[in-house]
Amino acid sequence: MTALKWRDKHEVAMLSTYHSNQMITIQSPCGQKLKPEVILAYSEKKGKSDLSEQQLMSYPCRRKCHKVWYKKFFR
């Protein structure tokens, strides 16, 4: 099992039983960067679930505090 803590823009912790701790060189707009294989596989495979979570974070919904209706009902 591989445990990894990586910081690029944000700190990310990952556990993997499939990937090793191998570093891969990628080409970015800022030049070449070394990234772990686990991070690249996650970025490649992440789907709409991460996108939807990201969109939900821009519109936080707060639950309204409701009075406890059942207390009035039983009284």
Image (spheres, helix red, strand yellow):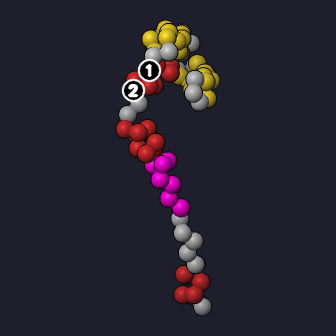
Taking the image as shown, residue 67 lies to the left or right of residue 32, namely right
- Amino acid type at mark 1: Ala
* Quadrant position of residue 9: top right
Would you name the residue on which mark 2 appears? 45
Q: Is residue 73 above or below residue 49?
A: below
Residue drawn 59% across the image and 30% down it: 10
Residue drawn 40% across the image and 23% down it: 44
- Asked if the residue at tag 2 contacts the one at tag 1, i.e. Cβ–Cβ closer than 8 Å, the answer is yes
- Report the front residue among 12 and 20: 12
Q: Residues within 10 Å of mark 1 (few under 14, many from 20)?
A: few
Q: Residues within 10 Å of mark 2 (few under 14, many from 20)?
A: few
Q: Residue furthest left?
A: 48
Question: Looking at the picture, how far across and down is residue 28, in whole percent?
Answer: 46, 15
* Quadrant position of residue 50: top left
Would you name the residue on which mark 1 appears? 41
- Amino acid type at mark 2: Lys
Question: Looking at the picture, how far across and down is residue 33, in whole percent?
Answer: 52, 12
Taking the image as shown, residue 59 lies to the left or right of residue 9, namely left
Residue drawn 54% across the image and 69% down it: 64
Question: Looking at the picture, how far across and down is residue 36, in whole percent?
Answer: 53, 15
Q: Which residues are magenta?
A: 56-62
**In the image, residue 58 lies in the stretch drawn in magenta:** yes
- Residue 18 seen in the figure: no
Which label was assigned to residue 63? none
How far apart in space, not on screen, are marks 1 and 2 (Cα)?
6 Å
- Report the front residue among 21 and 1: 21
Could you say whether the residue bearing mark 2 is in a helix, strand or loop?
helix
Q: Where does the C terminus fall, quadrant-wise?
A: bottom right
- Residue 71 seen in the figure: yes
Q: Is residue 74 above or below residue 39?
A: below
